[in-house]
Image: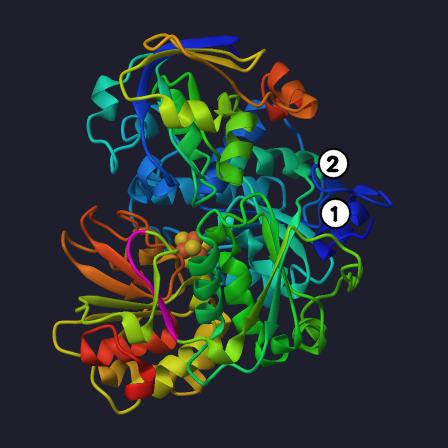
């Protein structure tokens, strides 16, 4: 996992659920590229055509609520997104993101203030989020050591080897 | 400091005397579950990791339920992959067409989970088994892969909210109305990362089917798990099904709860969740005039025999409104047989409904009842997110089987008390 991320923000609101992140009609595949091609389709038709490698998704509360489909963080990661920032995450999405190595940060202040199109950079080791467009910085909750260990080893499967 | 029921089960499986909310633990699992959508991803992870065996071939359940009988070639390929895996590792509990059911109806029915168990499933509604006094929670495919290899999973010990249920609900107030009421009250993130523990003398009016329905939707309040104490209903249910050791954990008297709510079940009304979140609830008296195009009765929330019985009681000798499609999905092959023997299918078909083989089908917008643009469905399922059952501009209203059946007759969301 990269220790830093920086990119343009795609901003959404509360309760972005796994059905809009990747609709069930596409769950008959586990191909990462196919999942990425439909990422966010039901909430933002233009997302897939606009997103660039390294871009950042920002949501507000309860991001990723709904089903346990790991296809949701996989679609986001495979679409090139480097990091998701939200006020809070739904718990299965949180687990899944960590387990597949998609960095996610809880930071209510940043999640509320950052806007679509802002340029944002993130330092995962310190949890510092910088909004380069406004110049404002935020401190996100750092990961507990146990989880840092999973991430450092490159995901859950490597950590149980 | 006292522990909640959930914390005691986690401590037991982690081999610890005590655990505290927020603590990260690793615990041994009694059952690991996957379905035809999540297992293929887990199998990829399993194989990429070079794993050469599963921890215990009797403690893994693979249920082909979402897109089965296979709806298209891709779905067929996904199931074929899981079938090959089940063959190769001799997975005892592999359920395919002919013996499958919707996973969360099937596992309790087959006695694959029991009181005091610790289960994870790569499906968010794995929380259903909390009805049996088990700690059970949904995870993703990577967790499932790791668990199939090691038989263990990591958990952050949750804090809890206590729901004290008192009083006797009226005839058409079911488990579904109780949980919709609660989600309406606390919101879709009202129990985020927490356990929902149910207690109180009102439990004696909630059948196992009601409890399965309530625990099923704990995830819709963001909870990690929902859990019921073990009582005579539970013991009776598991008696001739579950062969494992029944472990009855009870919360300590001084267990710490972040919040306690007391709910008098006698004051509840049949409840409906409006689009596009389960928390948008109204009582049946407040819904107004909402015309529906489709009615779905079934799913892991309300596809059990008592759900079908109440729907049949309302539909008996009645006709479904013109222009309304009513689709009934029994949860398992056994429930299907029971309903057939009781004559419920006669009632459904004569009323103008169709009865499907068990499948998740339309619940997740998979197949067998997808909605067109602008269409509305009243459904006994558990989610009404944007596009959940079809077109992004279609709408899903969540309700009990009684409300769904009443609505099928009138063509409008209706109060079963008035049919
Ligand atoms: S019936 Fe619906 S909620 Fe239940 S497991 Fe199937 S898709 Fe999920």
**Residue at position x 77%, y 62% in the image:** B250
**Of residues B68 and B34, the one drawn nearer to the viewer in this rendering:** B34
Q: What secondary structure is found at the residue carrying circle 2?
A: strand
CA distance for labels 2 and 1: 8 Å
| Residue at the disc numbered 2 | B25
Q: Is residue B43 visible?
A: no
Residue B170's x, y, as percent?
46, 84
Report if residue A26 lies within the magenta region. Answer: no
Disc 2 and disc 1 on one polypeptide chain:
yes
Magenta-colored span:
B270-276
**Residue at position x 51%, y 59% in the image:** B216
Residue A47's x, y, as percent?
25, 25
Query: Label 2 lies in what chain?
Result: B
Q: How is the image coloured?
A: rainbow
Q: How many marks?
A: 2
Q: Looking at the rendering, which quadrant does residue B370 occupy?
A: bottom left
Going from the N terminus, do you reach mark 2 or mark 1 first? 1
Image quarter where the C terminus of chain A lies is: top right
Residue B277's x, y, as percent?
35, 52
**Residue at position x 43%, y 64% in the image:** B180
Residue B76's x, y, as percent?
36, 45
Query: Label 1 lies in what chain?
Result: B
Q: Quadrant of ligand 1?
A: bottom left
Measured along the vertical axis of the image, is residue A41 above or below residue B338?
above
In the drawing, what numbered circle is on residue B10?
1
Q: Answer with left or right where residue A149 lies relative to residue B33.
A: right
Measured along the vertical axis of the image, is residue A19 above or below residue A96?
below
Q: Are marks 2 and 1 in contact (CB under 8 Å)?
A: yes
**Residue at position x 46%, y 31% in the image:** A87
């Amino acid at each position: 996992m990269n220790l830093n991320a920086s990119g343009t923000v795609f901003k959404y609101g509360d309760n972005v659920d796994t059905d809009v992140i990747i609709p069930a009609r596409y769950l008959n595949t586990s191909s990462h590229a196919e999942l990425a091609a439909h990422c966010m389709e039901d909430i933002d038709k233009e997302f897939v055509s606009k997103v660039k490698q390294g871009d950042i998704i920002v949501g507000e509360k309860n991001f990723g609520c709904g089903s346990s489909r790991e296809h949701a963080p996989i679609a986001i990661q495979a679409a090139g997104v480097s990091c998701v920032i939200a006020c809070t995450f739904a718990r299965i999405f949180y687990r899944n993101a960590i387990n597949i190595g998609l960095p996610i940060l809880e930071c209510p202040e940043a999640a509320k203030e950052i806007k679509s199109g802002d340029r944002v950079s993130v330092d995962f080791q310190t949890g510092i989020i910088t909004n380069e467009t406004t110049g404002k910085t935020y401190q996100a909750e750092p990961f507990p050591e146990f989880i840092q260990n999973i991430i450092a080893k490159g995901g859950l499967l490597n950590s149980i080897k | 400091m006292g522990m909640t029921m959930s914390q005691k089960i986690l401590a037991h499986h982690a081999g610890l005397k005590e655990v505290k909310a927020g603590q990260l633990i690793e615990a041994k699992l009694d059952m690991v579950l996957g379905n035809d959508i999540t297992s293929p991803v887990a199998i990829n992870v399993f194989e990429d990791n070079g794993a050469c065996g599963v921890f215990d071939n009797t403690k893994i359940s693979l249920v082909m339920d979402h897109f089965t009988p296979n709806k298209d070639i891709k779905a067929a390929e996904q199931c074929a992959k899981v079938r090959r895996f089940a063959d190769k590792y001799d997975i005892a509990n592999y359920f395919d067409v002919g013996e499958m059911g919707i996973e969360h109806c099937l596992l309790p029915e087959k006695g694959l989970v029991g009181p005091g168990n610790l289960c994870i499933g790569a499906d968010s509604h794995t929380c259903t088994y909390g009805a049996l006094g088990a700690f059970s929670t949904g995870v993703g495919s990577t967790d499932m892969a790791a668990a199939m290899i090691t038989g263990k999973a990591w958990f952050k010990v949750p804090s809890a909210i206590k729901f004290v249920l008192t009083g006797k609900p009226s005839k058409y107030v079911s488990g579904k109305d109780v949980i919709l009421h609660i989600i309406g009250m606390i919101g879709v993130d009202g129990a985020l990362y927490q356990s929902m523990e149910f207690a109180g003398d009102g439990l004696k009016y909630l059948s196992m089917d009601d409890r399965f329905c309530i625990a099923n939707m704990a995830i819709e309040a963001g909870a990690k798990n929902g859990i019921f104490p073990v009582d005579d209903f539970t013991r009776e249910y598991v008696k001739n099904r579950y062969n494992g050791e029944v472990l009855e954990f009870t919360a300590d008297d001084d267990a710490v709860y972040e919040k306690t709510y007391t709910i008098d079940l006698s004051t509840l009304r049949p409840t409906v969740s409006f689009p596009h979140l389960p928390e948008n609830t109204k009582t049946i008296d407040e819904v107004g005039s909402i015309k529906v195009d489709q009615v779905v009765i079934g799913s892991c929330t309300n596809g059990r025999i008592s759900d079908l019985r109440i729907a049949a009681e309302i539909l008996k000798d009645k006709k479904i409104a013109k222009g309304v499609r009513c689709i009934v999905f029994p949860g398992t092959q056994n429930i299907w047989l029971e309903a057939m023997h009781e004559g419920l299918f006669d009632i459904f078909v004569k009323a103008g409904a169709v009865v499907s083989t068990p499948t998740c089908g339309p619940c997740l917008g998979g197949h067998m009842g997808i909605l067109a643009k602008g269409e509305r469905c009243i459904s006994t399922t558990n989610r009404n997110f944007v596009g959940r059952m079809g077109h992004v501009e279609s709408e899903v209203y969540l309700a009990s089987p009684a409300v769904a059946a009443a609505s099928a007759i009138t063509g409008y969301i209706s109060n079963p008390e008035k049919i």
